[in-house]
Amino acid sequence: MLPEGLEASGPPPGAILIVEDNEVNALILRSMLRKRGYDPVVAADGIEGVELSDRHRPRLILMDLQMPRLDGFAAAAEIRRKAGGASPTIVAVTANTAGEIVDACEAAGFACVLTKPIDFEDLIATVRRLLGAA
């Protein structure tokens, strides 16, 4: 029997990729998802995010926008290019929700924008909606 609040059957391990350069933010996102039975993979920056996306083929990616080496916009574009028609759903995760950033996310093909600090209920509702879970 699973502890209260965990789903009996969520997506398989690695179905969610977190791409976040801030260790604390990555830990918080990972912990929130694990509370609901998800087992996300974590990448420390955009380049690692592209590599792990290629290796794990996640269904959903939570992508920080501002990272060293390769920002979230460039990482998302590279992931989509490499995946071809089997591109994962990518959610922008940012503290900057100025209108032009939200517009840029929409134009870049992000499914939606989650605002930092991340609200637990918003995160879980977004993940469930985008993964098609009940």
Image (tube, helix red, strand yellow):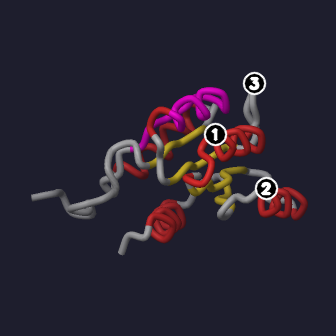
Question: Would you identify the image quadrant in which residue 97 lies?
Answer: bottom right
Q: Closer to the N terminus: mark 2 or mark 1?
A: 1
Residue underneath mark 3: 69
Tell me how far mark 3 sits from mark 2, CA to CA: 19 Å
Q: Residue 25: x percent and y percent?
A: 57, 40
Instruction: Please tell me whether mark 3 sits on a helix, a strand or a loop.
Output: loop
Q: Position of residue 129 (x, y in %)?
A: 49, 71
> Disc 1 marks which residue?
82
Q: Nearer the viewer, mark 2 or mark 1?
A: 1
Is 99 left or right of 77, judged from the image as shown?
right
For badge 2, the amino acid type reads Ala
Residue extending furthest toward the front = 85
Residue 72 in the image, given as x and y percentages of width and height? 72, 41
Q: Dot 1, crowdedness within 10 Å: few (<14), some or many (≥20)? A: some
Mark 3 closeness class: few <14, some 14–19, many ≥20 residues within 10 Å: few
- The type of residue carrying mark 3 is Arg
Q: In whole angstroms, how far apart are the C-alphas of marks 1 and 3?
A: 18 Å
Stretch in magenta: 40-54
Say which residue label 2 marks.
Answer: 108
On the image, which quarter does residue 111 sit in? bottom right
Q: Amino acid at mark 1?
A: Lys
Tell me which numbered mark, 3 or 2, is placed earlier along the sequence.
Answer: 3
Which secondary structure class fits the magenta region best?
helix
